[in-house]
Amino acid sequence: MMDLLASFYPGPLKDYLRQLLVYNGVEYDVEIFLGSVTAMVLGLSCVFSVILSVLAGVLFSLVFFPLSIFLLAAVYVYLLLRANKRGDFVGSILPDFLDLVSSNLKNGLSINKALLASARPEFDFFQEEILRVLGAMSSGSSFDDALVEMKKRIKSRDFETTIRLIVQGMSSGGDLSAALSKVGYVLRERNFVYRQIKTEVHKYVSFIAFAVLVGAPMLYGISSFLIDMLSGLSAVYAANTSVMGGISASSSDISSGFVEFFCLAALLSTSIMSSIVIGLIKTGEWRNGLRCMPFFCVISLGLFYLINKALVMSMGGILPH
């Protein structure tokens, strides 16, 4: 059953997910993973679709297919963000790790013992990756090959660049201890500059977040209420002029349902695009902004309905009936 469900996915997508699972440190066959996830998503979607169709009278297909696609996309986004988070963690501890290895090499330890002594518990999963490298070296692999294999398991540009510099330095006959120390210094300076830049762009991120979470919902909530009020006044005016035999007037063609749909579509598109922009500003990767997307969507839509209902409750008495 699992193989049958996994067979519907194209080969390139399986290869990409296989590498994504490696980045997440998941020792799981991609065929079994895809089959299990697909079966779980289809089961949950079926249950929720049946519940909504029975309780709310919603058409089964209108819920089942969009919900299934959403859940599958949520699994992919979770794996992607987790892989990026692991890569960012390695990038943050990499200067300290390189300094430790360099110090151990200067103290006369071999590369194997220097790596083993530098594998600290506070490095979390990176300690396991170091031990994996040592295991490969003890099995006959060269230090260069073990590092290249390690690079394939961590999604980090800093780590990839570091491994490439180390391999190139060793192949050219350079001092490994000095090379590690130099790379660690460069990475530490780079992280310092990155933190300064991050502080500078924080105000722009705050402005975007305020516009999405507060400004846009307030604007659309008030606009929706005003359009409803004007539509009601126009309808009353048209009815009065028709009864009095005066000049005929027609009510507005804009319905409250259309206005609400437009506001919801605008808020959702604004939330999605803003989260992508924030990801680009903060990290340079638009995918990292996807973690903000559910929060932006829920808060903006919730505030829109809250403002609209508050206006109706406080000023609903002046609306014509």
Image (cartoon, rainbow, N blue to C red):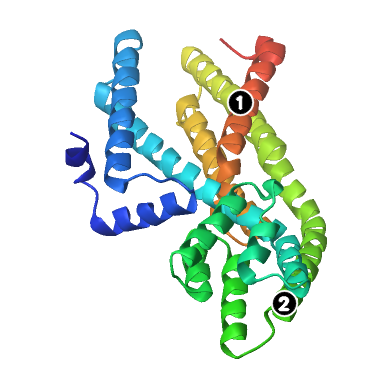
Please tell me whether mark 2 sits on a helix, a strand or a loop. helix
Please tell me whether mark 1 sits on a helix, a strand or a loop. helix
- Where is mark 2, residue-wise? 177
Does residue 265 appear anywhere in the picture?
A: yes
Q: Is residue 288 above or below residue 246?
A: below
Q: Quadrant of the N terminus?
A: top left
Q: Quadrant of the C terminus?
A: top right
User: Is 213 left or right of 249, judged from the image as shown?
Assistant: right
260 or 215, nearer to the observer: 215
The spot of residue 102 in percent (x, y) is 74, 71
- Where is mark 1, residue-wise? 302
Q: Amino acid under label 1?
A: Gly
Q: Residue 187 occupies which quadrant of the picture?
A: bottom right
**What crowding class fits label 2: few (fewer than 14 Cα within 10 Å), some (14-19), or many (20 or more)?**
some
247 or 168, nearer to the observer: 168
Q: Amino acid under label 2?
A: Ser
The spot of residue 68 in percent (x, y) is 33, 33
The spot of residue 219 in percent (x, y) is 67, 36
The spot of residue 265 in percent (x, y) is 49, 38
Cα–Cα gap, marks 2 and 1: 56 Å
Identify the residue at horizontal 46%, vertical 66% (top origin): 149
Q: Is residue 261 above or below residue 151?
A: above
Mark positioned earlier in the residue sequence (2 or 1): 2
Marks 2 and 1 in Cβ contact (< 8 Å): no
121 or 8, nearer to the observer: 121
Q: Residue 115 occupies which quadrant of the picture?
A: bottom right
Does residue 58 appear anywhere in the picture?
A: no
User: Is 7 left or right of 260, judged from the image as shown?
Assistant: left
User: Is 113 left or right of 150, judged from the image as shown?
Assistant: right
